Amino acid sequence: VTWRGVTAAVLGIFFTAALWWTHFDVIAPAARIAQHAAQGRSRVVMARDVYAYCQLVMIGGIMLFALGAEEMVRQIADGSINLAEPTHGPGVPLLFGGVICYLCGGMLFQLRALGTLSWTRVGTVLVLAVAIPLATHLPALAALSLLTAICIGLVATEVAVMADARRALLKAVFEEKTTYEKHEADWRARWHEGAPDEKPR
C-alpha cells in the first residue's frame, strides 16, 4: 500500500459516489413516483423502458468506467511508472467514455420516466467528451483528478441550482413513505385484531 495507490482509490470513491448521487438522489425517487402515478399498460411499458432498456445503458457505462478506473489506478500505483509521465493505454477512453455512457443512460432514464432533461447533465457530457483528448496527454493521476472534479462539479451545480425542486421532491418522497408506512401499520393492526376478512386462509 502506497500513498499513490491510496490517492487513486480515494479519487475513485469520490467520483463513483458522485455518479451514484446523480441517479439515486433525485431521479430515481421521482421516477418511482411517476411510475406509481401511471396506470394500466402505460405503467408496465414505462417500467420496461426505464428499468430494462435505459438501465442497460447505465450498466454498460459502469462496466466501461470500472475497467478504465482499474487501468488508471494500476498505472498510478505502479512505483516503476513516473507520475509525471503521460497516461498510456485504453484507461482514459474507457474511464471518460464509461462515465459519458452512464450519464447518457441516466438522461434516457429521466427523459422516459419524467419527460425532462437536465441541462447540467448535457453540459457535463459535452465537457467530458472535450476533456478526453486533453486527459490522454495528462499523467494518470491528473486525468483521474480531472474526471473526479468534473463529476463533483456536476453534483455541486445541481445542489445549488435545483435546491428548491430537490427539497420539494424529497418532501413528496417522505410523505409517500410515511403514508405507506401508516397504511401498512393500520393493516397489520386489523390483522392482529382478528378481523375474519383480513386473515389468510
Image: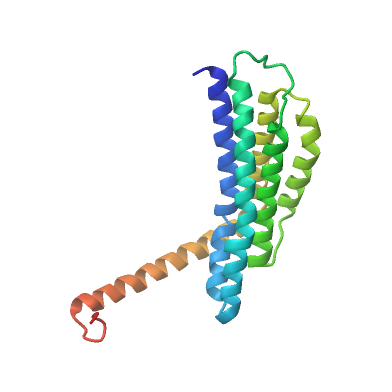
Q: Is residue 25 shown to the viewer in this render?
A: no
Residue at horizontal 62 percent and vertical 22 percent from the top: 76
Q: How is the image coloured?
A: rainbow
Residue at horizontal 80 percent and vertical 31 percent from the top: 134
| Residue furthest to the bottom | 197
- 36 or 60, which is in the foreground? 60
* In the rendered image, the vertical position of residue 152 relative to residue 57, given as above or below: above
Image quadrant assignment for residue 29: bottom right
Q: Position of residue 16 (x, y in %)?
A: 57, 40
* In the rendered image, the vertical position of residue 56 relative to residue 3, given as above or below: below
- 72 or 166, which is in the foreground? 72
* In the rendered image, the vertical position of residue 195 relative to residue 174, given as above or below: below
Image quadrant holding the C terminus, namely bottom left
Q: Position of residue 5 (x, y in %)?
A: 55, 22
* Numbered marks: total: 0
Residue at horizontal 30 percent and vertical 76 percent from the top: 187
* In the rendered image, the vertical position of residue 121 relative to residue 147, given as above or below: below
- 168 or 55, which is in the foreground? 55
Q: Is residue 50 shown to the viewer in this render?
A: yes
Q: Position of residue 56 (x, y in %)?
A: 61, 56
- 191 or 183, which is in the foreground? 191
Residue at horizontal 71 percent and vertical 42 percent from the top: 97
Lateral position of residue 29 relative to residue 122, left or right: left
Q: Position of residue 101 (x, y in %)?
A: 69, 48
